[in-house]
Image (cartoon, rainbow, N blue to C red):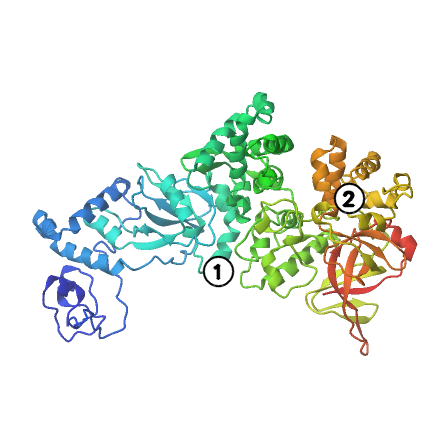
Amino acid sequence: MKCQACRISKQKCLPENRVWPNKCQRCISRGLPCSPPQKPLRSDGHHVSPSEEPVSEPTSPNAGSEGSDIDEEIHHRLPTNLVSLRKRFSRPHVARKQNPNRIAWIDAVRKVQARHRLLEYKHQPLSPGTDIRLLVIHPGEGKSAIYCHLEETVFPKEGVLSGTRPYFALSYDWGWGIDDPNHEIRILDVSPYRKIMSMADAAWAFYSSKKIYIRPNLFNALQQLRSSKESVVLWVDALCIDGQSYEEKGSQVAKMPATFGNAEEVYIWLGSATATSHLAMSFIPQMLNLGRFDDYISDLNVIEKWRAFADLMKHRWFSRRWVLQEVVLAKKATMHCGSESVEWSDFATAVALYNTGFYQIKELFRVSGKYSHTPDLLNDSNGASVFTNATSNLVQRSSDGAVIKRRCSIEVLVTTLSALKTSHLSDTIYALIPLAKDASNIKIDYSKDSVDVFVDFVAQCIKSSQSLDIICRHWAPTALDGISSPTWILSASGSPFGDSSQFWGDRVNGDSFVGTPGSPIYNASAGIGLPLDIATVGYSLTGNIVDVAPRTILAKGIQIDTISELGARSIQGIIYRETLEMGGLRMSGRDDRFDRSAVPDALWRTLVADRGADGNRPPPWYRQAFLHCLDFVTLDHDIMTPTLVEHSPRLVKEFLRRVQAVIWNRKFFQTRERSLFGLAPSQARHGDIVCILSGCSVPVVLRKYQYRPISGSVLRAPEYEFVGECYVHGLMDGEAKEMMGCETEFIQLV
């Protein structure tokens, strides 16, 4: 039986009775990597190994030699040396003639090459005292193979890297579905203790390297961003973080603000160039010429450029939640698409200009012959707008671009950025912690159940805001729909423009009645105030113990009435005849028309939720705009708002857009005893309860879940499912106190 090195050289492997891991005499004398002794090949061509022990890692001939840095000059020439070595070692007889003294090395290299061909790179734990890894990409160009190595570094207290080369951070889209990691790069073994002093060392570095497979988009980014003359130092999450270690992933995620904040520049990679991307990237500098902007939004010859720019804004990079902090925390950022790039600040300005002229651009498309039949090609909900607004408004910066203050709460961030995607449910919260001003006490723990992460988030929001409005907001990922979770954690699919899978679509739901955190639009619970808490163990009140189940909210509230009449769901904001009649509008006796002289105030005010688009009281001309719409009802006496909004005067358009923002996908209802008129969620049913909860700025719809009887000294509150927020005309600004009094009861939301 022989080791692999002796078998290749056709030499005796002594001693014959050696036991692995003892090496043979020939390998010891020549410094060769040895292997377990193997029997001769069987007839099927396979070896029979006497041991299942894995082959040990080969030892470098320079192992143990002194030296803490890579020789820069040889390091710079390393890829060229490797190309030369690969050609020479593919013809070993030529190498022997050129340098007979390296016969042993050739055998060793061939051995290492065979052993490592199928071995993939595995991260080693970070050394104690180090903070992050950096990816050093060796020079190369075109479609040549990518060689790189990893280095470790630290963050000094001053907040900048010391003793290392400046680095850049890469922000990119990982890819989903068919984008599996199938592109190979090589991680070289050029540890800090090894000096590459010779061709033999270079050969060792290459043939002891290992493969790592990455996704196509990252592979294209590394290929495009590397230099042909010098190494490029990048921080790339997929390569610099060991994703298999939850402990390292958690610690590295916590350090990402420092990682991106300390980078010389953040490269935003949108992928390889296309025909439309080239048109969009070249159009951005033209858009910044404000003297020509009015011409661009009215010129049909520019329509293809607007189409290309709109497509660029729909890139799925803008739908990723993690990349938001990567741009917001960057001192400087540039956006790359193929070989073209623009400053992020210029792109943000171009997006703001696009939003300013959106309706004029949309009209340009409508009157064009090519796009007149595709009115949904453009939309007013795009991720690029979310990102550019966030980078401008979420933080305050110093003159050098460093972040000096965070402006928003974690509740604002999570609820306003609900359409952004994450691969892990808990990242719905964790990805935004570095950008929040009040989330320092939230610990990143990927071993924790995602539902419990969400429950803790809601608890923090209630505690910090002293409000229950968070339960009316749609923010949770839709992947939670198939998981047992509280009914008061609402899916992002109920938000105005839907969940992340519908990120680029048009409106699918009405706007929320509770407004943005900290700026409520209504005050329905005024005068109905008691401390509230999110319960996990119990709630103490006047000496009794209120038994509360985990993952439930215990609150105080007033039951107003039950729903007795419920209209159809308002698809696309259409106002149906049944809705108009439920609101008190009657037909004229003389002809088949509505009586315009007796339009109830409650009807038109409910259509706009008694507020204008700015959240203030509606302007008086809203009533006149409603009367105008009554002149254009269909044969079924419905008001088709999608059609009218395209062909009405400017003020009527403004009124109709407000109506759509309020009633879209909601149901009009009337209550049984008090005949209250309002708007309920699309999930509402007959018999549901209209309630006002202490600490909630709007009424809500609840559904009886179950009653648990009182047992001894333990009081068990009635349990209800949370259906959603609602608008009740005449009860939005504290009128419930006068109507119902201050008597409240315990209500437990499950």
The answer to whether any part of residue 616 appears in the image is yes
In the rendered image, the quadrant that contains the C terminus is: bottom right
| On screen, residue 361 above or below 137 | above
Point out residue 570 in the picture as x, y percentages from the top left corner: 73, 50
**Residue at position x 46%, y 50% from top?**
175
Query: Which residue is disc 2 drawn over?
Result: 635
The quadrant in which the N terminus is found is bottom left
- Give the Cα separation between the discs numbered 1 and 2: 65 Å
Q: Is residue 346 visible?
A: no
Q: Secondary structure at mark 2?
A: loop
Q: Name the foreground residue: 180 vs 261.
A: 180
At mark 1, the secondary structure is: helix
Q: Residue at x 58, y 54 (%)?
A: 428
Tag 1 residue: 247
Question: Closest to the observer: 68 or 369?
Answer: 369
For this orientation, the residue located farthest to the bottom is 712
x then y, percent, for residue 724:
74, 56
| Mark 1 surroundings within 10 Å by alpha-carbon count, few (fewer than 14), some (14 through 19), many (20 or more) | few
Q: Position of residue 468 (x, y in %)?
A: 75, 55
